[in-house]
Amino acid sequence: MNSEAETVGKQAVLAWKVDRGSFNGIAIDGLPVVAAVSGDRNLGMQEMGGEKPNVRSALYDDQRANAAQQLALVAQANELSKGIVGTIVQVTPAPIEFADHGSEIQVTAGPASLDVNKHLTHDPTCGAMQWFHPLAAVNDAAVGVAAQHLFTGSALGTKWSDPNKRSAFVGTLRTDAARPPGLCNSLTPSR
């Protein structure tokens, strides 16, 4: 926080896996989508009273999805991220690995990779503060450790590796009554 607010927290990998459900009337059961996002300032700057960052993103939707499902996955990522995906510069069908091992979630989609330990060991020196909220809509958000937070692609004009940080949120998302029931595992790095 403080002096780091302007210098870090500009990149994130967001991932969703729909266990069952639909988006805009399109069934997307079992399909994941991953967004690598890069901003010109801390992605949570608005939470601190600052200006909204200019964000570019590269999205990776499951290569098993048909054309309608691909559009639904991109629209879902945009809506659930509360618009943080910003300007989408690339959408790529890709093989996506999204594994929940109980205490750890691993996601890989092309050049984007995230590995989060869901069990956060409390460090008394941290001041027990959660400075930011998740970048995406999620229920039961829990802070985790991003053991790996990586993007090596060329679409965003930047690459990053930011491992071993208490910088991730993990949760589930149950859709509202306006959509058919569904469950989405959401993995969202914090700033």
Image: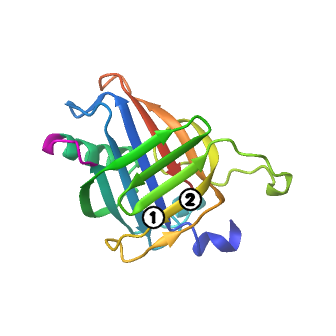
The residue shown at (15%, 41%) is 68
Q: Is 48 on the left-hand or right-hand side of 89?
A: right
Q: Which mark is residue 148?
A: 2
The residue at the point 57 percent across, 46 percent down is 169
**Badge 1: how crowded within 10 Å, few (<14), some, or many (20+)?**
some
Residue that appears at 49% across and 34% down: 172
Secondary structure type for disc 2 = strand
The residue stretch that appears in magenta = 62-68
- Judging from the image, the colouring scheme is rainbow
Asked if the residues shown at circle 2 and circle 1 are in contact, with their CB atoms under 8 angstroms apart, the answer is no
Q: Which mark is residue 80?
A: none
Please say if 173 is above or below 120: above
Q: Position of residue 8 (x, y in %)?
A: 58, 71
Of 173 and 105, the residue lying toward us: 105
Is 187 situated left or right of 55 in this image? right
**Residue 114 horizontal/vertical position (percent):** 50, 54
Q: Quadrant of the C terminus?
A: bottom right
> Which residue is rendered at x = 65% and y = 72% of the image?
4
Position of residue 19 relative to residue 86, above or below, is above
Helix, strand or loop under label 1: loop
Q: Classify 10 Å Cα crowding around label 2: few (below 14), some (14-19), many (20 and above).
A: some
- For the N terminus, the image quarter is bottom right
Marked residue nearer the N-terminal end (2 or 1): 1
Mark 2: which amino acid? Gln
Q: Amino acid at mark 1?
A: Lys
In this figure, which residue is indicated by the disc labeled 1?
52
